[in-house]
Structures are given as C-alpha cells and as structure tokens.
Image (cartoon, rainbow, N blue to C red):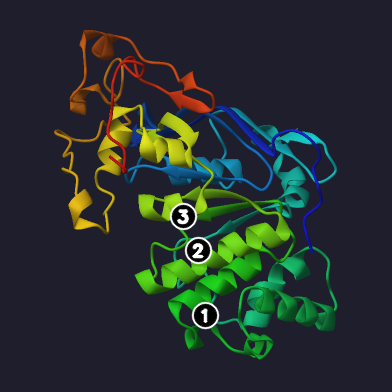
C-alpha cells in the first residue's frame, strides 16, 4: 500500500530552523548561554526524493531530524509539511494534542537496531504496536498486517512470534524498517540506519531501502556520516558544519565538483577502490568550532586553508552558484576544489 499523494509542491520545507539548548549553572540554574545545535537551517524535500544530511559528529544532523519529527521542540523557524490530504501544516507550531494524527505520516528508522527494539516483546507486538495505538484493535488484523510487512522487508511471517534476541543486527534493522512502514508514512527519517551494521549487511539494508522507496513512493531524510553510503542512496546532499548547512547540491555534482572547502575535505576521506586514483587526504587543522561560542564571520574560517580577511568578519549567506547548487562561502565562485573523481 502506497502513502496518499499529498499533491503538488514540496513534501517538506524547513525555513530558518534553530534549536538552542540552554547552558545552566549554579543552585538556581541560571542560564549563562546557549548551545546552538541547529543555527538557521533551511531546505526543501520533494516527494519520493532522498536528501542526505552529512557532517562530522555533533554538527546538528540528528537534532535537525528530531526537530522535524517534533521529538524536540524547535527554538525558532518553520517546518512546513504537506499532509496526505494536501493541507500544509507548520509542525514547529502545532500543539502536542494535534501531533498524533500527523505522526502516522512521519516515521523514523533508528541508528541502533539492538536498543531500539523492546527485548520483552515479540515481533507481532513490536511491529503491530503502531497499528494498535492508531485504532486497529483486532489482533487477527494486526497479525495479517505484520505478516505483510515482514514479507515486505525480506523476513518470514512465522518470525512474528519470536523475540528480538533471536535475530542478527541486519534482521533487527529490517524489523525496525517494518515498524516504521506500518502506518504507510510519506516521510521516513533514517538516522544513520546502517552505521551499526557490518559492511556486508549495510549494502543489503541500503538496497532494501532503495527498493522500498521505488515500490511505495517513500521520501527519505537520510542522516549519515559515511559519504560512500550517501552517494549510493541520495538524490541531493546537504553538508552541515556547526549547526549550519554550508553546501547543498545534487549528489553527483557535489561529489564531482564541491564548492565549499569543508566539503572538499570530507570528500578527500572517501576511500577509492582503485589505487591509481588515490588522492591526498586533506587534514584540517584546529578543532571544530564550539557551538556555544562560535567564531565571528564564517564558522569554518579558523580551519579553512582558503580563508581571507572577509571570512573572519562577515558571515556568508547560503547562495546559489549554479541551478540547485547552494553554497555558504565568500569564495565559492572563484575556488577550484577537488572532488572524488579528481
């Protein structure tokens, strides 16, 4: 069963999203400052598209995805989601009482397949729980739907009577995918869904997700740090650094011709199977900027080998340098940077 068609226009639009966490100290828990985990992030996501959020650990990828699902309440910004009925709702401003109907259309695949499944419940209860919560009271109907979902993700229906400990990591992630698909969502947020799996199993799960997207018309927001994985599954890539998107482009264009120095450094770490194509690794100097006390101007300038005086004083805006290619860098139009194919 495919999710309802939300009609024309982007399925998801994020505008000026910010999430600040207060820094408290003392007996009275006085607020001394804020950690800018997500700092003015904007992007859109079309139906049946996969957008990947990539960057170093702590750059704000997961916080952004959790704000979109309203697992965290944003500090500022708009999250416009087009429902199956065609209405556009601002998820960031919805009261909690109105979130439950929307959660049927927005689901998440978690990073750790071992801790995300209740060890005291069978697959029938785990995968069938969203159905029960949303009104499917008949256990027989739930069992039929769970059997259908297990077949969909490549597991045998008779497994529904077993507990999670009886399955491998890859099988557990398939169970997590089945649970996410139980309510026919239109948007699936995948938070590093293969990073905890063996390399041989990663390809199986990624291929499964691609097949399910083609079969069910799913839209993915794919959070990852492995650029090899991102190249395999995504249509567009958004590179984040200290809570900001510094580059957003179609996957092939970004890998072949990056326009931001941070993206170039990330791509230099992608392993190449042909030893004749080995490129020199770009090792960035210094430490990642502190999101509680970011530097003036461009957040990346203390580590950037191409920085000029304006980078230290003026914060760059995310601007188009080519159709569909957005970059936040003062020198984006003049630099010639190295991609994976170089």
- Residue 13 position (above or below residue 104): above
Q: Is 293 on the left-hand or right-hand side of 143?
A: left
Q: Is residue 118 above or below residue 158?
A: above
Say what secondary structure mark 3 lies in. helix
Q: Is residue 101 left or right of residue 209?
A: right
**N-terminal-most mark, 2 or 1:** 1
Foreground label between 3 and 1: 3
> Disc 1 designates what residue?
119
Real-space CA distance between mark 3 and mark 1, rounded to the nearest whole angstrom: 32 Å
Instruction: Look at discs 3 and 2 and give the one toward the viewer.
Output: 3
Point out which mark residue 206 bears. 2
Which residue lies at the image location 45% right of the left edge and 73% below the top edge?
A: 114
Image side of residue 186 versus residue 61, left or right:
right
Residue 28 visible within the image: no
- Residue 71's disc number: none
Q: Residue at x 50, y 54 (%)?
A: 233
Q: Secondary structure at mark 2?
A: helix
Looking at the picture, tell me which residue is in the foreground, 301 or 98.
301
């Amino acid at each position: 069963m495919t999710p309802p068609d939300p009609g024309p226009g982007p399925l998801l639009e994020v505008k000026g999203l910010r999430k600040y966490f207060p820094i408290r100290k003392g007996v009275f828990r006085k607020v001394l400052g804020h950690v800018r985990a997500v700092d003015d992030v904007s992007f859109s996501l079309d139906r049946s598209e996969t957008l990947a959020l990539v960057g170093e650990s702590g750059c704000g990828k997961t916080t952004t995805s959790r704000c979109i699902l309203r697992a965290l309440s944003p500090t500022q910004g708009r999250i416009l989601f087009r429902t199956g009925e065609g209405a556009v709702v601002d998820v960031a401003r919805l009261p909690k009482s109105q979130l439950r109907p929307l959660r049927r259309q927005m689901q998440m695949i978690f990073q750790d397949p071992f801790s995300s499944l209740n060890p005291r419940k069978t697959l029938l209860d785990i995968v069938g729980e969203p159905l029960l919560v949303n009104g499917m009271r008949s256990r027989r109907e739930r069992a039929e739907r769970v059997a259908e979902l297990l077949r969909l993700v490549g597991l045998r229906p008779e497994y529904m009577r077993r507990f999670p400990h009886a399955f491998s990591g890859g099988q557990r992630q398939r169970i997590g995918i089945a649970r996410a698909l139980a309510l026919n969502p239109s948007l699936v947020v995948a938070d590093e869904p293969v990073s905890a799996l063996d390399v041989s199993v990663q390809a199986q799960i990624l291929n499964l997700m691609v097949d399910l997207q083609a079969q069910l018309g799913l839209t993915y927001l794919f959070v990852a740090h492995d650029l090899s994985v991102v190249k395999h599954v995504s249509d567009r890539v958004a590179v984040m650094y200290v809570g900001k998107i510094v580059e957003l482009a179609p996957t092939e264009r970004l890998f072949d011709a990056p326009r931001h120095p941070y993206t170039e450094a990330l791509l230099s770490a992608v392993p190449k199977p042909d030893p004749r194509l080995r490129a020199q690794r770009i090792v960035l100097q210094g430490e990642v900027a502190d999101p509680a006390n970011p530097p003036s101007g461009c957040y990346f300038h203390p580590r950037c080998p191409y920085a000029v005086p304006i980078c230290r004083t003026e914060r760059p805006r995310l601007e188009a340098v080519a159709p569909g290619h957005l970059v936040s860098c003062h020198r984006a139009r003049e630099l010639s940077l190295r991609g994976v194919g170089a």
